[in-house]
Image: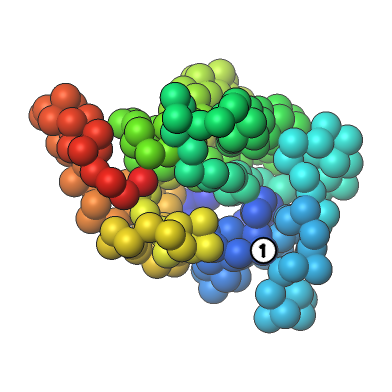
């Protein structure tokens, strides 16, 4: 078995590394002693200067909705044994009230098909490097939808289903697949939300804690943990609560 029980010594790839949770994963990996971190973004120049200047960080241009871009990255990054699929988009659109399907299509294209494309491209690399680990950054809204972000919730529910299926499919090659489901995280993406938020580094810490156990699903922060527990007891109550909330 070649699963990392910590990030120490890992050769990691982080998508959406230019801000928010992705940037926190890059910092957290470096702090935890990762051997090398490929920090991927559509425009690597958007990466923080502190990241760009670190000798263990290699900036990578990567657009997860572009086949050629993903294939090129996979062809170059053949030493990766830990992939953090963090790149995502949240457009805050409802399903019925939205003017058209553009937000729903975009969210599905990035959050579902982009994730699938990455899993498919890097699975053979992880296998060649002894199994490795896939970490998919999802959302608690994968488990219960928020009507105010209906299409985002649906895309993350699809991504959770994908994560479960990929986990089963990759068991034979000894690749570990972890889903990370926070509630609100304090990033650019949640600027307009007034609800309590956790810091991106808390997501990273919870994920690294899970690496040391056999946890498949991680619920960083108190809000996500509470919702996950309530969903086991009374899923309809959680659904009603989210339906009433004005926040996303």
Which image quarter: residue 35? Answer: bottom right
Residue depicted at 49% across the width and 25% down the height: 158
Asked whether, in this view, residue 239 is left or right of residue 55, the answer is: left
Asked whether, in this view, residue 41 is left or right of residue 185, the answer is: right
Residue depicted at 87% across the width and 47% down the height: 76
Residue depicted at 60% across the width and 64% down the height: 19
Would residue 204 be visible to someone looking at this image? no
Asked whether, in this view, residue 242 is left or right of residue 19, the answer is: left
User: Residue 23 placed where, x, y %?
Assistant: 59, 65
User: Residue 98 placed where, x, y %?
Assistant: 51, 31
Q: Is residue 47 above or below residue 78?
A: below
User: Residue 146 placed where, x, y %?
Assistant: 34, 36
Is residue 71 or residue 31 the one in the foreground? 71
Asked whether, in this view, residue 30 is left or right of residue 178, the answer is: right
Q: Which residue in the structure is indicated by mark 1?
A: 18
Is residue 148 or residue 34 the one in the foreground? 148
Q: Quadrant for the N terminus, please.
A: top right
Q: Please tell me whether mark 1 sits on a helix, a strand or a loop.
A: loop
Q: Is residue 156 above or below residue 185?
A: above
Residue depicted at 74% across the width and 56% down the height: 41
């Amino acid at each position: 078995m070649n699963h990392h029980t910590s990030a120490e010594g890992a050769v990691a790839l982080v998508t959406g590394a230019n801000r928010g949770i992705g940037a926190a994963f890059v910092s957290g990996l470096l702090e935890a002693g990762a051997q090398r971190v490929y920090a991927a973004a559509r425009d690597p120049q958007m990466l923080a200067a502190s990241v760009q200047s670190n000798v263990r960080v290699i900036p990578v241009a990567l657009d997860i909705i572009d086949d050629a871009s993903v294939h090129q990255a996979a062809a170059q990054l053949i030493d990766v044994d830990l992939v953090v699929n963090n790149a995502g988009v949240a457009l805050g659109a409802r399903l019925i009230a939205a003017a058209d399907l553009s937000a729903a299509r975009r969210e599905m294209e990035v959050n579902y098909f982009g994730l699938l494309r990455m899993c498919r491209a890097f699975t053979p690399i992880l296998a060649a490097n002894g199994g490795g680990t896939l970490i998919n950054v999802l959302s608690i809204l994968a488990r219960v939808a928020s009507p105010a972000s209906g299409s985002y919730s649906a895309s993350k529910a699809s991504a959770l289903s994908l994560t479960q299926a990929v986990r089963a499919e990759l068991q034979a090659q000894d690749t570990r697949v972890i889903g990370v489901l926070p509630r609100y995280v304090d990033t650019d993406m949640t600027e307009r939300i007034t609800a309590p938020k956790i810091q991106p580094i808390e997501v990273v810490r919870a994920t690294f804690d899970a690496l040391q156990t056999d946890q498949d699903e991680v619920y960083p922060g108190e809000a996500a943990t509470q919702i996950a527990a309530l969903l086991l007891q009374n899923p309809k109550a959680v659904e009603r609560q989210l339906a009433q909330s004005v926040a996303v």
